[in-house]
Amino acid sequence: MRRNIVHIGAGELTYAIREIVEQAGRLEALGVTMSWENIGDPVQKGERIPDWIKDIVADLVRDDASYAYCPTRGEPATREFLATRVNTRGGAQIGPNDILFFNGLGDAVSKALGFLRREARVIGPSPAYSTHSSAEGAHAGDGPLTYTLDPDQGWQPDLDEIRQKVRYNPSIAGILLINPDNPTGVVYSRSTLEGVVEIARQFDLFVMCDEVYINITYNGAPAVHLSDVIGDVCGLSLKGISKEVPWPGSRCGWVEFYNQDADPIFARFAKSLVDAKMLEVCSTTLPQRAIPRIMGDARYAAHLARRAAEFKHRAAEACAVLSGVPGITVNEPQGAFYLTVLFDRGALTQSMSLPIPDGRVQRVVEEFTAAPAEADFRFVYYLMGATGIVVVPLSSFCCERHGFRITLLECDDERRQGIFKTLARVIPEYQASGAAAPVLQVGGN
Ligand SMILES: Cc1ncc(COP(=O)(O)O)c(C=O)c1O
């Protein structure tokens, strides 16, 4: 090439959650029966959509207007409906023009972080859902900036750490939260959220909060929205229907901007996202039209409560099986539908393995593990080859610790319990297989 055409941030674009599918696919082709516990798609894992929701969608399918473009910001009636929901909670007050629809929240994340000025950084959690950390790193052309979610404090962040990092890094313009969190399942208390907003106020930053799981909380965890605590600070909340309806294939999510009037730079940034969406015309029409009818239905609250109770049950079930296993830590999730299993520091070595009876499968796993990688990737590959269970290495969630994320989505009780029990059996077996050798750490942050 006459010029280097590769974007400065190209190296930051990694998404192990799906990359691992290709490798698992090779093992599946050799006859391994896979249990796909890597992707957060409830529908793919067998959840049935209630008939009353399907009836709403079917009704809209018969309406020609559902096949048309919609306004760039999104369906006006839907934005009005969503703004009213925010306003009735009594915190930040917004109008329909403070809402902007996207083709799924993934689209919102990459636009919101991608259209920041190159040198303006957003500090985010570690571990972090990699769409955020990758998009932020790619926009800056550098590794992500992170604060730690502490496994010894139930994955809560340390506000002092955030404050210190913000204080000494003037490039930081915003703080990212994921609440409830993917991959840890932590739900932030009101005081933690207020503390983050206070730091933002002190240093003149904005707060960005991914609330795609905000209606999936349990174990008494509070569902405090950013809009409840943002006060007069600039903020944006990212919401969607992929996880709570659940309708991930709708590719429908939205951003709510709070206090655009408080800062002309923040207002200009918000406008740049509308302008960018205008170049694409608009986002998906049909799911936007369905939102007021689904969320405004008298059955919706019971639907959400039933799902939350189910995930609470599965989270407790997983922790009961895994919490006694040596060499790992599990914190019972309070929201979303993931569990992070954390290996003790130094617990994994590059000489550990699991027995794989089929020689062809064994050879492919050895091929996967031949390249230098974090030690939890090795565990994940052996787990895949020996048991067919597909999980995601924790180090791929912008995290220097080793572990893995598993979903709580398997609907078949026997199968799900079998998966947790298999993990409880093979984790000690894997660790016992290797003599202590130095852990190979690459990347990290
Ligand atoms: C925290 C978080 N944000 C955003 C998304 C993307 O959601 P969507 O399906 O709306 O693109 C996900 C998907 O797993 C997620 O876990």
Image (tube, helix red, strand yellow):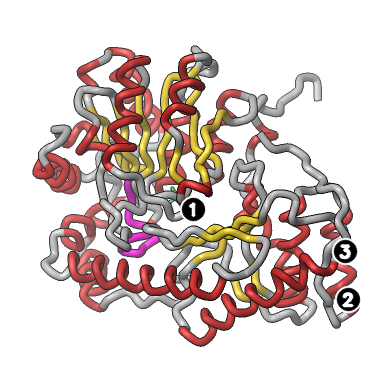
Q: Which residue shows up at 62% across the image and 58% down it?
A: 404
Between the residue at mark 1 and the residue at mark 3, the CA separation in whole angstroms equals: 29 Å
Question: In the drawing, does residue 416 fall left or right of residue 444?
Answer: left
Of marks 1 and 3, the one in the foreground: 1
Question: In the drawing, does residue 52 fall left or right of residue 179?
Answer: left
Position of the N terminus by quadrant: top right
Residue holding disc 1: 184
Asked whether the beta carbons under mark 1 and mark 3 sit within 8 Å of each other, the answer is: no
* Three-letter residue code for mark 2: Arg
* Three-letter residue code for mark 1: Thr
Position of the C terminus by quadrant: top right
Looking at marks 2 and 3 on the same chain, the residue that comes earlier in the sequence is marked by 2
Q: Quadrant of residue 175?
A: top left
Main SS category, magenta section: loop
Residue 145: horizontal and vertical position, in percent? Answer: 56, 28
Asked if the stretch drawn in magenta spans residue 240, the answer is yes
Magenta highlight range: 239-249
